[in-house]
Amino acid sequence: MRMEELVALCKRRGFLFQSSEIYGGLNGFWDYGPLGVALKRNVKDAWWNDMIVRHNDMKVLPGAPSAFEMTGLDCSIIMHPQVWKCSGHYDLFHDFMIDCRESKKRYRFDHIKGRWVTGLKHGENGAPAERQRVFVTTIETENELEALEQAALKYFGLRKKDADSLEWEEGISGIDSFPNNDFSQVLGPDARHVGTLTEPREFNLMFKTIVGALGSEDDAAFLRPETAQGIFVNFKNVVDSARVRVPFGVGQIGKSFRNEITPRNFTFRSREFEQMEIEFFCHPSESQAWYQFWRDRRFKWYVDMGLAGERLRMREHEQAELAHYSVGTADIEYAFPFLPEGEYGELEGVAHRGDFDLRSHSEGKLVREGDSLVLEKGPDGAPKWRGSGKDMSYYDDLKKERFIPHVIEPSSGADRATLAFLCEAYQVDKAPTSEQGKEEERVYLKLHPRLAPVKAAIFPLVRKDGMPEIAKEIYGELKKKMAVQYDEKGAVGRRYRRQDEIGTPFCITVDGQTTQDQTVTLRDRDTLEQTRVKIDELAKVLEERIE
RNA sequence: GCGGGCGUAGCUCAGUUGGCAGAGCACAACGUUGCCAAUGUUGUUGUCGAGGGUUCGAACCCCUUCGCCCGCUCCA
């Protein structure tokens, strides 16, 4: 399938539009049209129902260590700024970066260290040699002096034995002290010429805003880059109010915001996106078993919703790839058609976060040191980011045991899941035409009936003989239970195809026989087969076939 | 952020040297037909991505900008 065809269909039929399109669009933002909003809502409802509402806490699910409870939250998008400092997002999302025009490399501004040196620079193309004073730099943290000397030798075109001819000035310093960010005499860490570094630019990976109508920079706050933190900071509230016992999970669906450096690939990497996240709290001794359970359960959910093919896979992260807090992470990935052959894009990450989050929000931001998490200290020895000081431990009054729960986090992208379902559903096959024995190409969306924006379309075969009246009657009855459409315009074949293209799984047609025996035809999107169903039984039959 | 390509009707696209902005599909109305994109007639559809410049005259040339695609970079 070519991605452009799906994008064109999404626009033509009203699934997805570019945000602010009449003004030329806005990179990284998308609008869901009339059908798109229905599809995405169905994705979210399926998730919410399957994970939260229909969860039976009396039963032990296959693969689960025990029964467990599930509940939900809907937290604010803007939270206390300290939340993001303790979560680690502030540090990671707030760097000044500097680019090198020559090497095309990007460096963290505060990582570049260097030293002034003067030497004899041999002129190029026979030009006379001249003495030059340059600031050579490196991003090495070990053996800085050696790295700087090598950089200088290379720049001046000297051999190691001539190193003595270089005149070094005292002290290694950062380039943050240069006035007006004038780097014309600075040699970039991977550059061969001086003056190739750009001005430092702040990479605000979190969206910043100001709280209060008269607020200033002191009142800066951030739009959340993930919904998870709202659950962690409400951990005590949920335990105290919802009568839940560990192990239990809290689900949340909501918008998050990240200033992606390169928004690309349709809605895959958007700056405003929606997440479906669960934070599952359990006893540390059982956390590995729960991690396995959630990995497998979440993978199966996508399979059940229609991503059954080879394009879906589970990938366990390598040790080196793990985030600072994580003990284990697995990504559920889909081979999106816009990615190169053999590459997969993340739909959901299932992470074992240990007790990092609850402890950080209690003690202050933690860092990993060997096998344990310790409080991160600033240069002055004080905690870098102070926590809330609130006790985040849990007391199990049956086992008489107090502990800080470990957390398993299945974090899913609602927009990415929706896009994957669309990609997987896009099908082309052959269908018969009105002309005997002839076939034509048919484009349809083979969406799971639970996800389809329209569950059924109701047609009168022709616009006479009382058929429209009966069809409208059926439409009114079904409308009470599910999303249905009525269409009487044009030839019935065209109406079928139009519904195929938006993924409607069933079409109901009132024909000449209806007035005699109160039956209609029920046509299946995927097989094109028609069966006769009594009007009285339509709702029941449809509901069975949709689940 | 860098390099390359692109932007014309709802969609797919044509548009000659700078000289009246087009086609197919789709869409709408009225018929005929009556179970898989059938068919007749009629009709609607445009800031040519945006802003500026050159010119008697710009979809076309120049500059700026926004967006899309590809590659690099980035992706806690």
Image (cartoon, coloured by chain):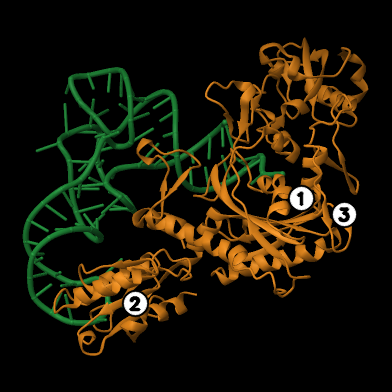
Chain colours: A orange, B green
Three-letter amino acid code of the residue under disc 3: Arg
**How far apart are labels 1 and 2 at the CA level?**
48 Å
Q: Which residue is mark 3?
A: A402
The answer to whether residue A147 is visible is yes
Mark 2 belongs to chain: A
Q: Which residue is mark 2?
A: A431
Q: For this view, does A29 lie left or right of residue A473?
A: right
Q: Which residue is mark 1?
A: A321
Residue beneath the point at 86% across and 38% down? A375
Is A541 situated above or below A222?
Answer: below
Sort mark 1 into few (<14), some (14-19) or many (20+) by Cα contacts within 10 Å: few
Three-letter amino acid code of the residue under disc 2: Ala
Q: Are marks 1 and 3 on the same chain?
A: yes
Q: For this view, does B17 lie left or right of residue B65?
A: left
Q: For this view, does A444 lie left or right of residue A345?
A: left
Residue A408 occupies quadrant: bottom right
Residue at the extreme bottom: A517
Mark 1 belongs to chain: A
Three-letter amino acid code of the residue under disc 1: Glu
**Who comes first in sequence, dot 1 or dot 3?**
1
Disc 2 versus disc 3: nearer the observer: 3
Q: Are marks 1 and 2 in contact (CB under 8 Å)?
A: no
Q: Are marks 1 and 3 in contact (CB under 8 Å)?
A: no
